[in-house]
């Protein structure tokens, strides 16, 4: 049990845990402070400057970089803070692709949440010069797209790649208003160290990183990834009896919400028209559909011709531990050989 | 070898050079001197001596300060006076050899002044000339006199005595001495140095670092470069004392790669210092070990910000991070790190050597010691100057600088580079110290000082600095990345004649928000040039926006050229020169400029013969047909 810290936020007495920052403490107590670059699983960056708060009626600072202290008095709003936030929000919106209806993050977007909270004044906003030039979209990755015109440079993807995945495939590049997130040497993501895990895509608070061919599911099913024996927990998103998305299960003890490229993006085989759904037996040089009984009979007949080291078995990493156990038992006890391996090492 | 023995032999070498029995030619060959032709002058002297069979000693030294007089050559004949010659060319060098070295005519017309106790008829005493008289050259005491590639010259002039003394003191006592001196950070922020040292000294941990910020990036500033090129050992000695004091074993000098000569001289100085036992293991025979490394910056302005600089040394992208924690608690590789500017460290050996009281005796109550400025712009005597804190801007510009160049009228002085502000004539009596400049809306900065005359458009100056910061912001935090861009857009529109009445209020509003909300010092100060020009030159913004007129005659869209009918003789020279055929008129008839075709290139004004002067440039836009 972590030490409890008592503090006051907007006149309310709240408790937080030692080591938390003011933003975490506030959000935990259902007091929203506008923010874009903060993510609970990552180190705070303090880049968006939206989570400004007033401490003890004196100093203004950013909540995500201020550890909670006993007796601290926090105000999340003041005329000065509101004005500064307004300016920052307006700057972001003027630099942002505002075609929200065409964005998959619409209604889930953190920038929309900030705008909703801070409030937008069209007259003020129109004083600014909107970005005219459209930056090229990086769709080099087969699974997701990066649209810099919708990026707020919060750096969550950069920190995710470094802190969560350890790949460090992307970073900020270029200076000033030309700064973007890209692979080393401003190269497309496919030419970087990117492992396509998609951890950045799920954390992107706006519509900059989006899954290709995304369809919003109608409901979700909690299950275990079928790709390998790790047993990562996931939620498959279902729509019209088709799997359309996969999301890591934060409560899975095996994976704690994380997924790899296969678990996250490799579900389309399920509904693929070329997927094998019945055994095939080669007859006269052509594969012909067969029943399971027919196929198993053929296997028994052919296996019976071999004994001992004439035989070898390779099992799949997609099998469960139990399946793999049975395969090796069969190979050793029935076929009489130790020639057993599987592909998980590949 | 004991330090006293090292010092004795260095002094012997120095005196032998100064009082030698052959002529001594000392050439200012820092980057400034070299770009003015110092190396060519050196070659001419060498050739002349060889051709005439004259034995002479030629030494390259650093920078003495008066840029307007480069290349500078010091000539000391055996037993003769020490004369400094200005703007020496190959031709003058030949004349000096012929007339002064061979014969005995010192050619006073080429001399800037005499040095030391020497007096020569017709030549002023250098330190009594206006440029030097009000200066207090403490930090730059050696610059322009010693050979920066020869450690013995530094030692003979008091060098490394501070280190020898510090090593016999308790580290806590060194901290006390720095605190008592009142030294404040010379990078521009003015944080009390002693307090910073104390934080690092008290920070727990066996592994600590000392870093020098030599990433001088302000446009027009060259103080650190000059000091590194002229007296590199002062920095090395200061950093070694710092290492001993806080308990660090390793130091980095973060120097921009655009300073190749400074880097070369630093590396040479580090090697010499190691050889003498002032760096490396068991320094001066004691138990203290300290090593120094020069780390090259790749030319990003933001890397002058301490946390970005640290990120850069760590191998990351030079991006600042939120403070606290300050580097004194968690700096390079998460270890306590002391980070100071070149000038700050270079003061340290002098303070230790001569005592805190000596330093505290110079300057004002809250700003001690001297201030170094790179005085440039529209000033008669541009150069590198060192003055006691508390001196007024007027004394610097008019006494030392000789006033506005070409008889111009003073308009503003800019201090602190892109983070600073522009002060008008009414602030000329502002004393130079951290707090007065800040109160006036500018900052001391690292030492850039640009003088502007009536031909400078203040809106354009603000635009220039914003363009710089906008390009140099790292892009991390929202207000700085996007706010400076929007402010620049507004300023560009104003200078292009598209200003709107609400623009100035919006600039102020946005500028204040950027200052409050930005992550690091770059963003927190970037709006300063705009805010101060609005504060002191509001009428110029109004002229641009409301009258569509640039009073400084600089913004092309807001000026007009017209032909004065009474003066025009119809010679057709301007009409033929006009690139857009905007000038019409028959021979011997008054010409007229078609304002709709005129691109305001100014060729007509330039070409109109001096005896007519029939073309004038006026502020504001002339409507079509108006003359």
Image: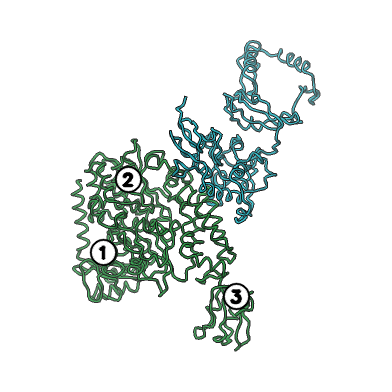
Q: Colour of chain B?
A: green
Vertical position of residue A267 compared to residue A59: above or below: above
Q: Position of residue A321 (x, y in %)?
A: 62, 18
Q: Position of residue B288 (x, y in %)?
A: 27, 40
Q: CA distance from mark 3 to mark 2?
A: 60 Å
Residue of label 1: B57
Compare residues B270 and B218 and report the one nearer the observer: B218
Q: Tell me the crowding category of disc 2: few under 14, some 14 to 19, or many 20 or more residues within 10 angstroms, Cα based.
A: some
Residue of label 3: B622
Q: Are marks 1 and 3 in contact (CB under 8 Å)?
A: no
In the picture, residue B244 is in which quadrant? top left
In the picture, residue B378 is in which quadrant? bottom left
Residue of label 2: B195
Q: Position of residue B369 (x, y in %)?
A: 29, 56
Compare residues B139 and B464 and report the one nearer the observer: B464
Label whose residue precedes the other's in the sequence (1 or 2): 1
Q: Nearer the viewer, mark 1 or mark 2?
A: 2
Q: Position of residue B173 (x, y in %)?
A: 24, 43
- Numbered disc 1: what chain? B
Q: Tell me the crowding category of disc 3: few under 14, some 14 to 19, or many 20 or more residues within 10 angstroms, Cα based.
A: some
Compare residues A234 and B424 and report the one nearer the observer: B424
- Numbered disc 2: what chain? B
Compare residues A34 and B87 and report the one nearer the observer: A34
Q: CA distance from mark 1 to mark 2?
A: 46 Å
């Amino acid at each position: 049990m972590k030490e409890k810290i008592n503090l006051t936020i907007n006149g309310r007495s709240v408790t937080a845990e030692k080591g938390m920052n003011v933003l975490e403490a506030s959000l935990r107590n259902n007091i929203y402070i506008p923010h874009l670059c903060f993510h609970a699983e990552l180190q705070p960056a303090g880049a968006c400057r939206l989570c400004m708060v007033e401490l003890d009626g004196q100093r203004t600072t950013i909540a995500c970089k201020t550890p909670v202290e006993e007796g601290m008095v926090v105000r999340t709003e003041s005329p000065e803070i509101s004005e500064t936030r307004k300016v920052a929000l307006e700057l972001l919106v003027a630099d942002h692709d505002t075609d929200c209806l065409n964005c998959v993050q619409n209604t889930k977007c953190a920038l929309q949440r900030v705008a909703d909270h801070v409030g937008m004044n069209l007259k003020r906003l129109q004083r600014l010069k909107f970005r005219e030039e459209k930056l090229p979209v990086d769709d080099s990755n087969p699974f997701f797209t990066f649209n810099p015109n919708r990026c707020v440079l919060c750096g969550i993807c950069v920190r995710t790649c470094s802190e969560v995945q350890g790949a460090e495939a992307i970073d900020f590049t270029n200076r000033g208003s030309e700064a973007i997130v890209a692979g080393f040497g401003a190269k497309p993501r496919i030419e970087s160290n990117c492992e396509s895990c998609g951890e950045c895509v799920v954390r992107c608070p706006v519509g900059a990183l989006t899954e290709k061919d995304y369809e919003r599911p109608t409901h979700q099913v909690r299950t275990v990834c079928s790709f390998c024996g790790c047993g990562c927990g996931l939620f498959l998103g279902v729509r019209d009896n088709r799997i359309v998305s996969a999301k890591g299960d934060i409560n899975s003890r095996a994976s704690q919400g994380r997924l790899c490229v296969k678990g996250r993006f490799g579900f389309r085989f399920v509904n693929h028209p070329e997927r094998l759904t019945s055994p095939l037996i080669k007859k006269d040089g052509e594969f012909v559909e067969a029943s399971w009984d027919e196929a198993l009979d053929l296997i028994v007949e052919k296996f019976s011709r071999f004994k001992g080291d004439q035989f070898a078995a390779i099992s799949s990493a997609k099998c469960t531990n139990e399946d793999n156990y049975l395969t090796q038992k069969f190979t050793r006890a029935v076929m009489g050989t130790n020639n057993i391996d599987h592909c998980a090492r590949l | 070898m004991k330090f006293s023995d090292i010092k004795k032999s260095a002094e012997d070498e120095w005196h032998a050079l100064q009082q030698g029995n052959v002529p001594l030619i000392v050439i200012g060959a820092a980057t400034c001197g070299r770009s003015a032709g110092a190396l060519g002058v050196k070659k001419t002297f060498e050739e002349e001596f060889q051709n005439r069979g004259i034995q002479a000693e030629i030494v390259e030294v650093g920078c003495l300060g008066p840029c307007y007089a480069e290349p500078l050559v010091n000539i000391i004949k055996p037993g003769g006076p020490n004369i400094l010659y200005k703007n020496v060319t190959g031709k003058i060098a030949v004349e000096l050899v012929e007339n002064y070295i061979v014969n005995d005519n010192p050619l006073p017309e080429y001399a800037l002044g005499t040095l030391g106790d020497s007096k020569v008829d017709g030549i002023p005493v250098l330190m009594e000339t206006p440029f030097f008289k009000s200066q207090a050259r403490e930090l730059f005491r050696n610059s322009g006199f010693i050979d920066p590639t020869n450690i013995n010259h530094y030692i003979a002039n008091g060098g490394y005595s501070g280190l020898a003394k510090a090593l016999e003191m308790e580290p806590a006592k060194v901290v006390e001495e720095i605190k008592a001196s009142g030294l404040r950070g010379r990078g521009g922020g003015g944080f009390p140095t002693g307090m910073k040292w104390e934080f690092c000294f008290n920070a727990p941990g066996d592994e600590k670092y000392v870093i020098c910020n030599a990433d001088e990036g302000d446009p027009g500033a060259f103080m650190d470069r000059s000091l590194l090129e002229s007296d590199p050992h002062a920095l090395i000695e200061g950093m070694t004392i710092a290492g001993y004091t806080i308990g660090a074993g390793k130091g980095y000098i973060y120097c921009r790669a655009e300073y190749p000569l400074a880097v070369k001289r630093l590396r040479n100085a580090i090697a010499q210092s190691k050889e003498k036992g002032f760096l490396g293991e068991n320094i001066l025979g004691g138990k203290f070990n300290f090593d120094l490394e020069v780390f090259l910056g790749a030319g990003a302005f933001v890397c002058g910000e301490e946390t970005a600089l640290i990120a850069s040394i760590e191998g990351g992208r030079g991006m600042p991070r939120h403070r606290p924690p300050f580097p004194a608690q968690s700096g390079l590789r998460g270890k306590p790190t002391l980070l100071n500017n070149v000038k700050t460290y270079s003061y340290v050996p002098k303070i230790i050597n001569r005592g805190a009281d000596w330093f505290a005796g110079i300057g004002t109550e809250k700003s001690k010691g001297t201030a170094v400025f790179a005085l440039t712009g529209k000033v008669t005597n541009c150069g590198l100057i060192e003055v006691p804190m508390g001196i007024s801007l007027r004394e610097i510009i008019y006494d030392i600088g000789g006033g506005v160049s070409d008889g111009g009228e003073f308009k503003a002085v800019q201090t602190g580079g892109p983070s600073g502000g522009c002060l008008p004539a009414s602030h000329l009596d502002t004393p130079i110290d951290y707090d007065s400049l800040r109160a006036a809306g500018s900052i001391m900065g690292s030492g850039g000082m640009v003088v502007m005359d009536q031909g400078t458009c203040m809106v354009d100056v603000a635009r220039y600095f914003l363009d710089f910061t906008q390009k140099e912001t790292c892009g991390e935090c929202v207000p700085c990345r996007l706010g400076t861009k929007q402010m620049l857009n507004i300023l560009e529109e104003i200078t292009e004649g598209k200003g709107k009445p609400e623009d100035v209020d919006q600039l102020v509003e946005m500028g204040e928000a950027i200052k409050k909300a930005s992550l690091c010092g770059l963003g927190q100060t970037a709006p300063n040039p705009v805010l101060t020009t609005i504060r002191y030159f509001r009428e110029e913004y109004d002229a641009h926006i409301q009258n569509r007129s640039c009073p400084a005659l600089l913004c092309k869209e807001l000026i007009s050229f017209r032909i004065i009918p009474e003066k025009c003789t119809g010679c057709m020279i301007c009409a033929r020169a006009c690139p857009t055929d905007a000038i019409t008129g028959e021979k011997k008839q008054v010409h007229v400029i078609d304002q709709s075709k005129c691109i305001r290139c100014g060729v007509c004004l330039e070409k109109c013969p001096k005896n007519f002067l029939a073309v004038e440039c006026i502020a504001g836009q002339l409507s079509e047909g108006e003359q």
